Structure formats: C-alpha cells, structure tokens
Image (tube, rainbow, N blue to C red):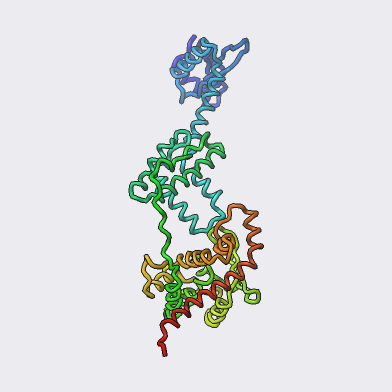
C-alpha cells in the first residue's frame, strides 16, 4: 500500500523519539528508510542500485515521488540516475568554481605572486590602476564569460578622457593578468592579446623637462650652489646632478651605504625601482659634499633627514619646490631631468658606450645573467665616467662664471 502524508509524519515522529523504524515502501521502487531517508531502488545494466532522493521533511512525499518519476524517465532513456546525479553535482561545482574565478580574484592573486620584487611605490601604482580603472567595470566577471570586448570597454573609459598612454598601460596590465590566468588554468585563452591595436596610437612621447645646453647646465649648477634653503635639501640638490639616481634612491640614502675608502655608494635593492642592488661610483666632488654634510647629519641614520623629523627623509616635493624657487618652471627642468641631462650629454660626447651609461642609470636589464655581468664588468668604466661627468659639470659651471666676470 502506498504511503500517505499522515503515515510519513507518524514514521518520522517515531524516529525522532528514538524508536526503531524500518523501511516502508511507497511503490515503483520508492521507499522511506528510518522514518526520514528517501531511497529509490532500481536495476541498471543488470545491477541492483540505490539512489538517494533527499531527507524528510525537507523533501516531502510529493517531492520524493516527483524525483522517482524523473529517475524513471532517465532509466527509460538508458541513463543511470546515479551517474546523472554525480555528473550534475560535478557540473554544479565546476560552475561554482568558475563563478568564483572572477577577474578581480585572479588579478589579486597575480598581484601578490608577481609584483613582490617591485618597490612599494610601484606596487601601489599597479594596484591603483587595477582598483580604480579595471575593477569598477570587470571585477566580478568570471573568466569563463569574460570577453575581449569587456576589457576594451573598461579601458575605453580612460581612452576617451584623452589618457591614451594610460589606456595602453591598462591593456598591458590586463594582459598580464589574463596570461597568468591561462597559465594557472583559470582560463583557456589570453583574451587580452592584441587589445592595444583597438586603441588610438600613443602620441609622440614628451620627455620630462631637462636641460642639455652646456650654458644652461652651467647656470643651473651655479643656482644650486647659491640655494640657501634647508640643509638637507641644499646638499641633496647639489649632489643630484652628479650621481644619476632617481629621487627616491637619493632621498632615502643612509650613511652606512657609503664606503668612502672605496668611493662607492651601494644602494640596497629595496629602494631601487627594479628591486636590484645598485652601485654608484663617487666622484671627488660628491665625496667632498658628503663629507661636509656628515658634519651635520652624520650622527643619525639618514643622510638627508627631513627638517620636521630626524627619522624621515626629505620629500620629493621638497626637492621640486627648491628647483621652482630657483626659477626653473615645470616645462624647463624637473627632478627626473637630472638623469636625462646626464644621459643626453654623455651619449652625445661619444666617449662612453651606451651600455655603460644605461648600467649607471640602473635601467632594467631583461636578461638577469647579463645584468649581473654588466654590474661587475662595467664598474671600472663607470668609475671613470662618473668622475669625467663631475668634471664636465664643474667646467660648465666655471665657464659661465668666467663669461660673466667683468673684463679688465
């Protein structure tokens, strides 16, 4: 006799009280075990099998019968209901994993694994590009449904603002995430490949403002000599033209990085843009300036402490403000322009190989073996070049003084 709702409730109640309840049949292979477990007994390919259909009362008698009937339909089609249930479960898990594998999730995983060697400031810049320009549009898009058009649509928001170069950078960044997704097994293809071709071409690069005319360089050197601001700022500005380094590399300098006997400054990897240690040969002029400054700041850790805190270095804005107070406008000279000035004039002199100049500028070398080789092999040439450059700067400074002196 088929089960009724009343009987099923009674069996369930007895089981809840701890009574032993056996198996009660409903018909068509459906039965209720232990007062709550719905099971379907059936044969497939000559084998007796059992399919779990749920637990009472979450699955009612009516729902259990519907599940039995669907299983019977599958059997009529030659499909094993147990295998179908297993496949459906695996497919649901796959879809769940795909839904969780969003662009943001993969991008953050890529960021944590692939940017550790970069400086903190460069990492912040990359994360900012993701969070402010890509995540607002495609963060929750699963890679299984993400299309090139989705990325392009996000990037075009930046492009239409006129930030063409930034739009290209965003495409390249999305490309790194997509390539990582493919290699990590989250995506089958790199869907960002070739996307930059759909963007407007990058306008001709306008380099950061710098001076390369010897007379103007001489005037700048004299202006640096005459600057009367904060002591740390004053000496940092006077040393900057001689050493080719970036602002953050100079500002954060510590006294124990300098070997005055060997006339070398060893900058640790943590303060370099490419996270590689860098050596700067010190010219006689730089050694003299540092020895002067050591009388004032040598008691502390930092070479250029902030006027507001001995535990913090001077800021880039402090250097820039000093340059502006000397009368150099934004389009005329920049802090980064000191590197461009040295690179341009030394390359134009023809006295030193381009590779030697690039090594001293600490421009990234893609080949790690070659980078290590250059670090050791070029040092003697770099020593000579740095002293020669310092003498060139002094000569340009002196030429201006001589030309401006009153004639007898």
- Say which quarter of the image contains residue 361: bottom right
Percent coordinates x, y for residue 205 in the rendering: 42, 55
- Say which quarter of the image contains residue 156: top left
Q: Residue at x 51, y 35 (%)?
A: 189
Q: Is residue 400 visible?
A: yes
Q: How many marks?
A: 0
Percent coordinates x, y for residue 114 in the rendering: 55, 49
Residue 207 to residue 77: above or below: below
Among all residues in the image, which is located at the extreme left? 161
Left or right of residue 323, residue 122 in this image: right
Among all residues in the image, which is located at the extreme front? 408
Viewer-proximal residue among 6 and 237: 237
Q: Residue at x 61, y 13 (%)?
A: 48
Viewer-proximal residue among 186 and 398: 398
Residue 211 to residue 97: above or below: below
Viewer-proximal residue among 287 and 391: 391
Q: Residue at x 47, y 35 (%)?
A: 99
Q: Is residue 299 visible?
A: no
Among all residues in the image, which is located at the extreme bottom? 408
Q: Residue at x 50, y 41 (%)?
A: 178
Residue 277 to residue 112: above or below: below
Can you say which quadrant of the picture contains the C terminus? bottom left
Percent coordinates x, y for residue 275 in the rendering: 57, 58
Viewer-proximal residue among 408 and 110: 408
Percent coordinates x, y for residue 373 in the rendering: 66, 58
Residue 263 to residue 154: above or below: below
């Amino acid at each position: 006799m088929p089960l009724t709702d009343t009987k099923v409730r009674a069996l369930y109640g007895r089981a809840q009280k701890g009574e032993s309840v056996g198996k009660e049949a409903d018909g068509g292979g459906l039965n209720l075990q232990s007062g709550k477990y719905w099971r379907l007994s059936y044969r497939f390919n000559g084998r007796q099998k059992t399919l779990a259909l749920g637990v009472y009362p979450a699955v009612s008698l009516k729902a259990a019968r519907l599940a039995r009937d669907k299983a019977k339909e599958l059997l009529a089609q030659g499909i094993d209901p147990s295998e179908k249930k297993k496949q459906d479960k695996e497919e649901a898990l796959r879809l769940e994993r795909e839904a969780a594998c969003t662009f943001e999730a993969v991008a953050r995983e890529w960021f944590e694994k692939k940017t550790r060697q970069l400086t903190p400031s460069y990492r912040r810049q990359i994360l900012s590009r993701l969070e402010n320009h890509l995540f607002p549009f495609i963060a929750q898009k699963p890679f299984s449904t993400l299309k090139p058009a989705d990325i392009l649509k996000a990037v075009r928001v930046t492009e239409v603002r006129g930030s063409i170069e930034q739009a290209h950078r965003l495409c390249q960044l999305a490309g790194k995430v997509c390539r990582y997704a493919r290699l990590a097994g989250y995506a089958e293809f790199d869907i960002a490949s070739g996307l930059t071709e759909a963007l407007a071409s990058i306008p001709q690069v306008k380099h950061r403002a710098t001076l390369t005319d010897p007379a103007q360089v001489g005037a700048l050197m004299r202006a640096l000599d005459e600057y009367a601001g904060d002591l740390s700022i004053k000496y940092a500005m006077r040393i900057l033209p001689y050493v080719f380094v970036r602002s953050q590399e100079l500002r954060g300098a510590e006294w124990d990085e300098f070997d005055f006997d060997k006339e070398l400054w060893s900058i640790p990897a943590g303060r370099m843009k490419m996270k590689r240690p860098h050596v700067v040969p010190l010219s006689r002029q730089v050694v003299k300036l540092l020895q002067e400054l050591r009388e004032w700041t040598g008691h502390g850790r930092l070479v250029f402490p902030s006027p507001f805190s001995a535990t913090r270095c001077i800021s880039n804005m402090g250097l820039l403000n000093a340059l502006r107070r000397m009368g150099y406008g934004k389009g005329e000279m920049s802090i980064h322009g000191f590197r461009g000035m040295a690179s341009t004039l030394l390359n134009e002199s023809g006295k030193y190989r381009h590779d030697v100049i690039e090594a001293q500028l600490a421009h990234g070398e893609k080949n790690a073996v070659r980078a290590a080789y250059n670090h050791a092999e070029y040092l003697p040439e770099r020593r000579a070049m740095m002293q020669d450059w310092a003498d060139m700067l002094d000569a340009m400074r002196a030429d201006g003084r001589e030309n401006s002196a009153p004639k007898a």
